Amino acid sequence: MAKTRPAPPAFVCTECGWTASKWAGRCGECQQWGTVVEQATSVGIARPQATALAPAADRVARPITQITTAESPRRTSGVGEFDRVLGGGVVPGAAILLSGEPGVGKSTLLLEVAAQSARAGRRVLYASAEESPAQVRLRAERTGALHDELYLASETDLATILGHIDDVQPGLVIVDSVQTVASSLIDGAAGQPSQVREVAATLIRVAKERSLPIIIVGHVTKDGQIAGPRLLEHLVDVVCHFEGDRQTSLRFIRALKNRFGPTDEVGCFEMAGDGIREVPDPSGLFLSQGAAEPGTCVAIALEGRRAMPVEVQALTIKASGPNPRRVVHGLDGSRVAMVLAILERRAGIPTGSLDVYVSTVGGVRFTEPAADLAIALAVAGSIEQISVPRSIAAVGELSLAGEVRPVTQAAQRRSEAARLGYARVVDERSQTLRAAIDDVRTHGRQRRAIDDIPPF
């Protein structure tokens, strides 16, 4: 009788699922380091066949037409900009992953969400694995986020957090962060792929079984990607990214994945000394004050579904060296270089012997092709000392032939410009860059003549 040998242990990559018979430090498929872990093997205890074939009454497969969504209405989080990104509110049982760079304000935002939800009558459990309750209390005092229905817990053990959920019976759970929570059932330190996968899967299972929305904070790597296994983003229902420049107080939250709504919405916030504030209308944040100066032009940018004016400024001076400088901030440097070449070749405006500085106002990034025409008009105005009137906005993409091409959602941009008081929008209707510049020259001279008329 032949002897049966036990099967060798299998190792699997947590990123791509590649399997191997022995451990390797690097995955042979996706070439990631430290993602190959030993796969759990069955202990040999089988469930009865009757149990496996008899699902629970609430899990019986039903026609999709008989399933209603009335049992899980959306609930507002109390923060309108956050609800906008989520698609209208928090869905019961949803697992939401919020990522962002260190210090951008993730904990401050979620503490505000927790406080507003508590004020709305829903009990909230804020489980912080990175700060003590006293530290969270100090931040809550500074931001005005104190409420009796907001419960704090400083725990790094997953089982203890689940025990707090049973004791508190909250309507919303916030875990900050998933990389600092560990499960005693899995070997390894907190933050390792196996631990992150187990903690996230357990929290998501609790959310689905209890119709309990859970917001999980995720760290990011130096490349801006969410740390941990890629499986984490597949498991959750919503993936949001909180971003912003540390040099400015402006913050944006975007939905990278949303099973309950669109992914093209953007929430706008402003960081202040007393916490974080919503900016429902950020129109005035990206415009300079005072009269129009040569080298400025307003463009209508599109952040998600939200159109907002962004002022593009350009400064040109005679180059002091053989290689003219090109300094760009807030815009795409390669597109600025292309626009300068189009200006010189197609519009007859020389830029090769000038140092060119181009920037946006307010620290906003405006990298879409719709900024081409505004960049060209700002640079041309700086060279010819012609001011683009404040009543004119520009939206258009430039081709290498000097043609002004239409951009996405042009009608929405024009309607937003009209709402904000812009009397004219220079766009693809000008057909060519030369015609657009001539149009602005004419309006600039008319405005300058009006301004020169002495008052009565």
Image: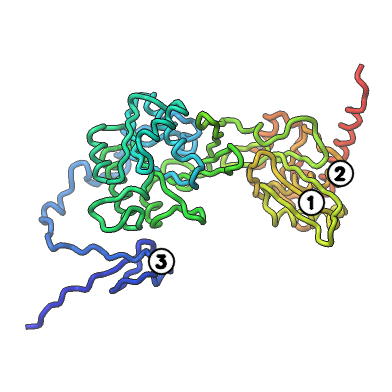
Q: Which quadrant of the view contains residue 206?
A: top left
- Residue 444 appears at what percent x and percent y? 86, 36
Name the residue rendered at 22%, 44% in the picture.
59
Residue receiving disc 1: 356
Q: Tag 3, which secondary structure?
A: loop
Quote the CA–CA distance across marks 3 and 2: 58 Å
- Residue that badge 2 annotates: 438
Say which amino acid is labelled 1.
Val
Q: Quadrant of residue 56?
A: top left
Q: Amino acid at mark 2?
A: Asp
Residue furthest top in the image: 456
Residue at horizontal 15 percent and vertical 62 percent from the top: 43
- SS at circle 2: helix
The image quadrant where one finds the C terminus is top right
Q: Where is residue 122 drawn, in percent x and y? A: 34, 27
What SS does tag 1 mark? strand
Q: Is residue 184 above or below residue 85?
A: below
| N-terminal label among 1 and 2 | 1
Q: Nearer the viewer, mark 1 or mark 2?
A: 1
Residue at 31%, 55% in the rendered image: 189
Residue extending furthest toward the left: 1
The first of marks 3 and 2 along the sequence is: 3
Q: Crowdedness of circle 1 by 10 Å Cα count: few (<14), some, many (20+)?
A: many
Whether residue 61 is situated above or below residue 34 in the rendered picture? above
Q: Which mark is residue 33?
A: 3
Distance CA(mark 1)–CA(mark 2): 21 Å
